[in-house]
Image (cartoon, rainbow, N blue to C red):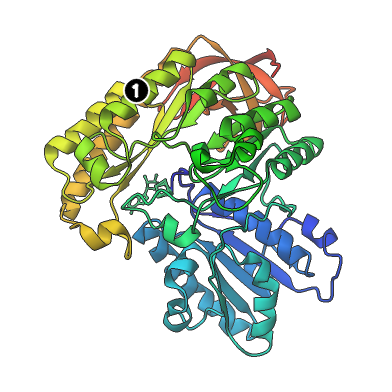
Amino acid sequence: MQIGEAAHQIVFLHPMSQTQAPTSVSSRKLYIESYGCAMNFSDSEIIASIMGEHGFTSTQDELDADVIFLNTCAIRDNAEQRIRERLKHLRMNKKRNNDLIIGVLGCMAERLKDKLLEEEKLVDVVAGPDSYRELPKLVAEVDEGGRAINVLLSREETYGDLNPVRLNTNGVTAFISIMRGCDNMCSFCVVPFTRGRERSRDPQSIVKEAVQLAEQGYKEITLLGQNVDSYLWFGGGAKKDFKKLTEEEQASSVDFADLLELCALAVPGMRIRYSTSHPRDITPKVIHTMAKYKNICNYIHLPAQSGNTRVLDIMSRNYSREWYMDKIEMIRGILPDCGISCDIIAGFCTETEEEHQDTLSLMEWSQFDFSYMYKYSERPGTPAAKKLVDDVPEEVKGRRLKEIIDLQNRMSTEKNQRYVGQIVDVLVEADSKRSDQDWMARNDQNIVVVFPKEQYKKGDFVQVKIERASTSTLVGVAVGYASL
Ligand code: 5AD
Ligand code: SF4
């Protein structure tokens, strides 16, 4: 999956869901915990909406819950191990409350299917990413004394008609899912198996959701998809190759650049971000659209995964080192000030020392603002697990990862120094982690900026003069309000 993985975070049903329960036949309480990428956090908001419509109210206390859902991630083995540990821990809650229902949802549910019911005896519900509309029914089946599973993948489901319940929200930034699934089949990746075929969501429903968020006072949206550059709407259904569309379909189709433009025009007072791009599919049209609208942030997450063409080839990424470099040049040619971040995998099957050096040199050449960096973790059933040997020893993977992280940290520290003495426009998101006297905000390029609160409020656009910079944070003082 290309969305940079967020740290494990716990989310709760927002009290809003209590008022959104038109057919409240019971007052059962639901507690949701989300793991993994932004897409999962966004899905939890869809789940909250579906359950809210069936009378489930929120609790922030797992001990108070009648139903606990873990919305899970399967991208690397350690993500799954963490969830297994959590399930073991939840056994205690089950002992305390015999009627407690525990559900495993999302990618790990889709990957392991009924094995989860057998392996983890305390799991009552297993639901894959395309079966969330069935959740109330699955819970009802458990009420009848059974266990319930639905892991059917769909070619059409986008949940486009639902009103996500904003969970754990700062009231300023929100995710909007624009597509589901992935057709890329990168050889290391489990996502095409757990999230199914790629399908795009109706642009009108996306714009409507953006406008609603603006009306509720939100100031920033992030359009989410595993590969946003292949977003294509031509009236519905699974993705098709543009060239295979009829003339009529082509004329009325909406691609990702068109969608960005629609959103930029519909919510001019909001910042727009998106994730994730694919080097194979990113187009100059997208970058020109970013340049045209001030409210589209100058920031692109463009995972390279490796800097070596042979490794990229066996990863089935469908581009070479030179192709990737051309894309970076294309972006910087149109948007010189664009922030660019990356995903890198260390120690993929058969990767040699020289090939690892190519990754380091690509990173240095590209000057990423930051990166998400991982050791390769073999996932059962993927093309890499079937056809390649995971032969880079664990300690070598670890050492290569460390070199990658050290380089990125050095580059980020150096790059952030360029802001010192400059005035940057930021959007205030929340209290700073270190002090409630300071705000945490982000600049256009997605870099965290911290400054004393003074008279400024959450959701304000502020100009901040930067005084010092570290690897991941700029620190400064406000000098006035900014305009978008
Ligand atoms: N091992 C390690 N990292 C992986 N990713 C995806 N699959 C694996 C795997 N099997 C990384 C990729 C992707 C990011 C979200 O997770 O870098 O872009
Ligand atoms: Fe991203 Fe490739 Fe996985 Fe698709 S298959 S989610 S593009 S890493």
Q: Viewed as shown, does residue 316 lie left or right of 144?
A: left
Furthest residue in direction front, as rendered: 247
- Using a 10 Å C-alpha cutoff, classify the residue at mark 1 as few (fewer than 14 neighbours), some (14 to 19) or many (20 or more): few
Q: Is residue 446 above or below residue 246?
A: above
Q: Would residue 175 be visible to someone looking at this image?
A: yes
Q: Viewed as shown, does residue 475 lie left or right of 168?
A: left
Instruction: Judge by depth and name the residue closer to the eye, 454 or 22.
Output: 22
Q: Tell me which residue sits at (85%, 59%) in the image.
A: 19
Q: Position of residue 244 (x, y in %)?
A: 51, 43
Q: Which residue is mark 1?
A: 326
Q: Position of residue 430 (x, y in %)?
A: 65, 36
Location of residue 409 (image quadrant)? top left
Q: Is mark 1 within 8 Å of ligand 2?
A: no
Query: How many callouts does the rendering have?
Result: 1
Q: Viewed as shown, does residue 78 lie left or right of 269?
A: left
Q: Is residue 85 above or below residue 324?
A: below
Q: Viewed as shown, does residue 313 lie left or right of 480?
A: left
Q: Tell me which residue sits at (64%, 33%) in the image.
A: 251
Instruction: Judge by depth and name the residue closer to the eye, 16 or 311.
Output: 311
Q: Position of residue 333 (x, y in %)?
A: 43, 14
Q: Is residue 86 above or below residue 393?
A: below
Location of residue 62 (image quadrant)? bottom right
Q: Tell me which residue sits at (49%, 43%) in the image.
A: 241
